[in-house]
Amino acid sequence: MDMDIRITKTNSSRIDGVDFDNLPFGRLFSDHMFMAEYKDGQWQNFRIEPFKSFSLHPATMALHYGQEIFEGMKATKTLDGKPYLFRPEMHAKRLNKSAARMCMPEFPEDMFLKALHTLIDLDQGWIPPREGSALYIRPTMIATDEFIGVKPSDSYLFFIFTCPVGPYYPKPVKLLAETKYVRAVLGGTGEAKAAGNYAGALLPAKLAQEKGYDQVLWLDAREFKYIQESGTMNIFFVIDNKVITPPLYGTILKGVTRDSIIRLLRDAGHEVEEYPITIDELVEAYKAGKLQESFGAGTAAVVSHVSEITYKDFHMVLPPVEERKIGPFAKATIDGMRAGKIEDPYDWMVPVKSPSPATVA
Ligand SMILES: *Cc1c(COP(=O)(O)O)cnc(C)c1O
């Protein structure tokens, strides 16, 4: 495989017009994007080009049958201005697990990493300098055969684009435990970061929002009993000083943030259990006054505090953020590592390498 990345730089950078103190989330895109095509059984034509729209044939298979997967990750700058990626190899592996489930070709891990380093090095001026802000990175793969008929596509497009995003301080979220709709079933596609999972979740989320909630708390598809996750976040509870998060049943997305939080909380001496907690156990813990905290974990916000969980007509109102310890500690640790203020003993922070032409194999 020819591993060269051909680089065409923009001659009209848009960066001067950007107000880095007021960044809209997900609506502003940086100067360049990476692209590659899968054709004749292999990935080829690796290139970085000025960010642009592309046109698609109306029969492009991704648009009809949903072979579309993505990743969401961040590049940040430490306070001394050096760019870093957070656990990029874990995202590379997860992308390929999603690809395998959706019958799509794997994207070579080494090429994925090289593309990330090259692209982020080139657009590092787009990483917002303020602590807590980041360059959000969206690797995406779509099926591109122009064909009507259900089969795996023979051709694919892989691309990576980026968006500068400001510090994200979400207000605490109110969750409604969902007792009618499900996100994922055992044997389904819930573990893949695949587009269709999100489309199916829109209606239940909208109905919950109409009732005054921010998101749904998913329960398992068979018994509506075991807690799964929420929106695009994995869920954590603190009960009687023990941290509990559902295990990866095969229906829950394997969050990089979830994994990181479990590790750093354990290393800080907290008891963390991956335990198939039921909604009834949560209600009992609440009634006994033992439910101390709940928070969601995901790349976008790192930690989102949960202020209320409602199950059927029972409202569980959680203590205010000031009284919590675990969620704020986890967020401060990860944000602190990103800013270079807290030491990273795990090598999660990977410095962006500027690939010199000589190292381009
Ligand atoms: C992306 C995502 C998460 C969080 O994963 P991170 O790797 O921590 O960002 C959790 N649940 C769902 C459904 C997701 O799509």
Image: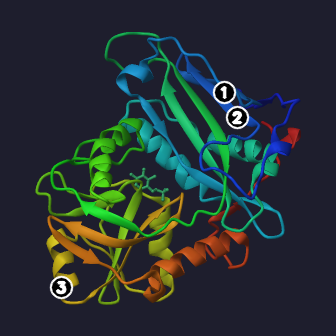
Cβ at disc 2 under 8 Å from ligand 1: no
Report the residue marked by disc 3: 287
Q: Quadrant of ligand 1?
A: bottom left
Q: Amino acid at mark 1?
A: Met
Whichever of labels 3 and 1 marks the residue nearer the N terminus, that label is 1
Give neighbour class at mark 1: few <14, some 14-19, many 20+ (Cα, 10 Å): few
Q: At numbered mark 3, what does the secondary structure look like: helix, strand or loop?
A: helix
Viewer-nearest of discs 2 and 1: 2
- The span from disc 3 to disc 1 (Cα, nearest Å) is 61 Å
Q: Position of residue 33 (x, y in %)?
A: 70, 34
Q: For this rendering, which residue is in front, 348 or 220?
A: 220
The residue where tag 2 is placed is 33
Which residue carries the number 1 mark? 1
Q: Quadrant of residue 67?
A: top left
Q: Nearer the viewer, mark 3 or mark 1?
A: 3
Q: Is residue 97 above or below residue 271?
A: above
Q: Where is residue 162 drawn, in percent x and y?
A: 66, 43
Mark 2 surroundings: few (<14), some (14-19) or many (≥20) residues within 10 A: many
Marks 3/2: CA–CA distance: 51 Å
